[in-house]
Amino acid sequence: MSRRYDVVVVGAGHAGCEAALAAARLGATVGLVTMSERCVASMPCNPAIGGPGKGHLVREIDAMGGAMGVIADGAALQSRLLNTGKGPAVQALRLLTDKQVYSQSMRQKLRAEPRIEMVAGEAAALVMDRDGDAGGVTLADGRALGARAVVLATGVYLNSSVVSGSSRLRAGPDGARPAQLLPKALEEAGLRLGRFKTGTSPRVDRRSVDYGELRPEPGTSLPLQFGHRFAGSSAPAATAPGEDPVCWATYTNETTHRIIAGNLHRSPLFDGTIDGAGPRHCPSIEDKVHRFPNRDRHPVWLERESMSSDLLYVLGLSTSLPVDVQSAMLRSLPGLSSAEIVRPGYAIEYDYLLSGQLFPTMEVKLLRGLFAAGQICGTSGYEEAAALGLIAGTNAARRALGQEPVVWHRSESYLGVLADDLATRSVSEPYRMMTARAEHRLHLRHSNADLRLASLAAELGMIDRARLAAVSGRQKLLADTKAALMLSRVMRSEDLNRELVALGTTPLRQGVRAWSLLKRPRIGYEHMCAWVGEGMPRLGHDDRQELEAMAKYGGYIRQQENLLSRQGRTAMRPVPAELDYTKVPGLAHRAAAHLGEVRPLTLGQASRVEGVTSADLSVLAGYLREWRRRR
Amino acid sequence: MRERLPPSLGELARDTIVALATPPGTGAIAVVRLSGPHALRIAYQIFRPVSGSPPPHSRSSRRRSMRYGRITDPKCGTMVDQGLLLTMPGPKSFTGEDVAELHCHGGELLVNRVLEICIGLGARPAARGEFTRRAYLNGRIDLTQAEAVASLVRAETEQGLRLAARQLEGGLGQELCGLLRRLSGVAAAVEATIDFPDDESEMPDGEWIRSELAAVKGALELLLATADSGRRMAEGVNIVIVGRPNVGKSSIFNRLLGRRRAIVDEHPGTTRDVVEARLDLGGVPVRLMDTAGLRESDERVERRGMAMTEGAIDTGDLLLLVVEAGPLPGPDDRRALAGVGGALPCLVVVNKTDVEPAPMDADEVRGALGLEPGTPLVAVSALTGAGFTELESDLAGLTGGPALLARDAAVLTTARQERAIRAGVAGLEKARTAYEAAMPAEVWLVGTYLAMDSLAQAIGRRSDEVREQVLEEVFARFCVGK
């Protein structure tokens, strides 16, 4: 029995859900295959969304009409703004979320979309169409799902093994069933798989904790959210963030470290049982203690996973040590002397696609019509997965509908940085987004994601006119406010000068334009309102941040953009994917070999390919000019 | 457990190159060098050791060895020559690939035969500099070292040789790497607080940041100061001797050279052409050019000589203006400088002190010539040699050679390096201004990354490698992530 869809998405995790929703938004019919309808958009690790880099991605997903932002807002138990002591470009929102509410909301959203049909089953093989491109999947029970494009969003389920102490189980995260049929099929199709590992922390019963010994971590009272505020009301949290704390902080100590050090020989990391590469950015506690023996304590947080469960996630104690050691470790922490482990921490190994097999559109080079998103691409994190899901889903739908794929550029969005890094560079450990990866960091801000991406989203049909109008409205508000500040003068006065000196900046010798004051560090919009007087519009947090960033960063961004736009214009020049590099005269053999492997889509991507020097790039650029002229 | 690595791009087809490594022509020994995946195979096909060949893929065929034997043409089995085979399997070879060298007797015909045989067995003629290029691409040497190889080959003076050798050792590359690492350290410390604010909430100490950035900038500026001299050391300096007819330019030329070279005659206008010679002046390779006297003249020969003189002045780096001791310089002397207009540095040589021993007032002479008061001036006698030690050391000082060699540290020798270091200094200046203006970290990091990119370019690395290095440091030095 077979069904036909425009797009089939394998896996209903964060990547799969965004992919399915994006494809449906573009008008494609979607078959969403999942091994368990329970586990839709589950969060097997930290119950949080956002942070520097990751939060930027969530804002951009939202700007493109995606779901993660809005759903996270609706499931928020607590919000925190990070890096408030630093500049506006690196400030980021992080929400502690209710895992169950998140999953339920996502499931509701999927069910509410008529073009998406959930299919319960396990994908076992790929189906090829007449041209040898991807044409669908067959399930383990024999059903065939035909499609014009397929998105693999299998997360950490491919041939997954859970390792805890000396036990190794063929299992997926949280005890789910692993996917063991698809990896063979992928290899038979010519795809190359590698092995990664990641880990998670134990969960304890919140009723077994002595809160008197812990320090509660409050969130911010600012009304912050990821999702756009324009499409109707922002759904209030199903469980409104109440007065009760949901997050506590504590530390490991000498005893904890001694327990760990004394049991290292029982750790699968150290006895060789695990051979997948793990991420440096998510070290296990045994790793931390081993590599930083001078530290006398490491921070640990306890977070509620859901208001409907008694589990506390122990952040900072990722481990695969045996359960008895985990118990001893935990009990050495203040407040946890009687803590009961409900679910032990474990390491999980899984198959992923080795680097070099994807275009920045997330399409598999070897097999047209096949796309990949999420941890199968070698990333780690819910946000990265959702971002890739958006990209892959968009391009899968466009292919199904006979349209050209979309490439996000790294100069315009973190989506672009993510896609470009995965497509161009060699990834040797699970990839996590960080602001340090973005050379255009000053421009790619939390507060201007919608401004940067709304027109692209509208052009593609991923947001509606009303939404676009709302963003244009915001843009106008900011422009008008800036204009007003440029026209207003702030007169010199003793009081004002005293205030300026107190803020650590130079006093005025004469009146100046208000805008020039806003450029100074430590001066904010609230000062503008105070000093300019009547008529300054009240701005929300994001608008204030954006306006301040425009003032303070403006000159620097212009400088950098001038430098980079010269490079950028060249960088965005497209390179035909079928170009035979061995036929380019004057191109070094090594460069030709590497370029032939990666098959970059733009000159910019070509410049980042290993083994390509600037001389090679000039040769290639010249050749393309000629080639274009002759066509 | 299944462990897969991405396919090594070295597994893809790559050429084996061959070239004559010694200068062409007839010599006692010629060295033909092969590099690439088939180097050893080809070598053992063309060369039969006296003690018998090892089997092709055996361990001994991959050992470093030097053996004596016969170079043969495998097609017909005839012996071409007797000689040595040196095998150096990669990756610890010059290029990082398998390298084989055939040492045979020198002689054009013989060498061409050997090359032909190698090509017939699958090698391709190497492009100019291709071995060095492969060494660089395989990470055996950095870009500054690759440039040093060229300098080494071109060196004309002992000191130039020493400088190039030092650079080949990696002196410049190491210094730049060290500075890059310092900047990386600052960036990493800051990025840790930006991307992992829960783990590293403290920004690094402001004083430390300021002093690190300043220290690197200072080191780069010191390097920049060596750029001109370094380039001159590597590329050489043109010194042009000018002056009115018969002041003794040619005699001075010859004495500097140490042997008779130009024609010296009593009558004005005897030296017809620009005569030039190369000499070593304080370690700097100098092209010394002797010119015809700049003077209005009727003779066509004279005129041609003067045209060549003006051409020489165009390419000159330093002017040696010769005047006679005795009466103050006059309009004819000044005309010698007319074509130049003060664009070139100048050293005044007052010649014939044997005839006019009375010392002249240096300031009066300069004034009469219309030169700046500080212009260097030396009194000599080309006839007796008096004053030449001072002249030579003054000249060497002006070219900057000795100061350069006295400096034990790295030196910039190419325009490419200078551009990169200049960009580095500009980046750090940007970073400093932003930092002093209390701009947030991600803003002054922009200038810092600019500087790092420039330094990386100087060594031949790329910007994304710079960022990777910073991230590496973040994870290595800071306990971040959970």
Image (cartoon, coloured by chain):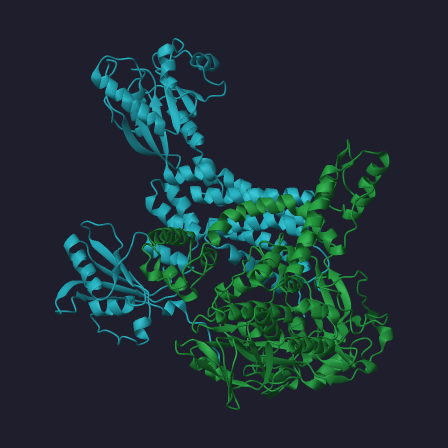
Chain colours: A green, B cyan
In the rendered image of this protein, does residue A180 appear above or below residue A65? below
Q: Residue furthest bottom?
A: A141
Please say if B244 is above or below A56: above
Task: Identify which residue, A304 or A483, lies in the foreground.
Answer: A483
Q: Quadrant of residue B43?
A: bottom left
Q: How many marks?
A: 0
> In terms of depth relative to the viewer, which is nearer, B359 or A161?
A161
Looking at the rendering, which quadrant does residue B56 occupy?
bottom left
Percent position of residue A592, x then y: 37, 61
Please tell me whether residue B180 is drawn above or below residue A33 in the rendered image.
above
Is A437 on the left or on the right of A101, as rendered?
left
The picture places residue B361, in percent across and down from the top left corner, at 46, 12
State the quadrant of the C terminus of chain A. bottom left
Residue placed farthest to the top in the image? Answer: B327
Q: Does residue B195 appear to the left or right of B414 in the view shown?
A: right
Residue sitting at x 35%, y 62%: A580
Q: Residue B15: percent from the left, percent from the top?
A: 30, 63
Q: Quadrant of residue B268?
A: top left
Most foreground residue, B449 or A242 = A242
Residue A616 in view in this figure? yes
Residue B271 in sight in this render? no
Above or below — where is B15 with respect to A488? below
Position of B438 with respect to B163 (left or right) is right
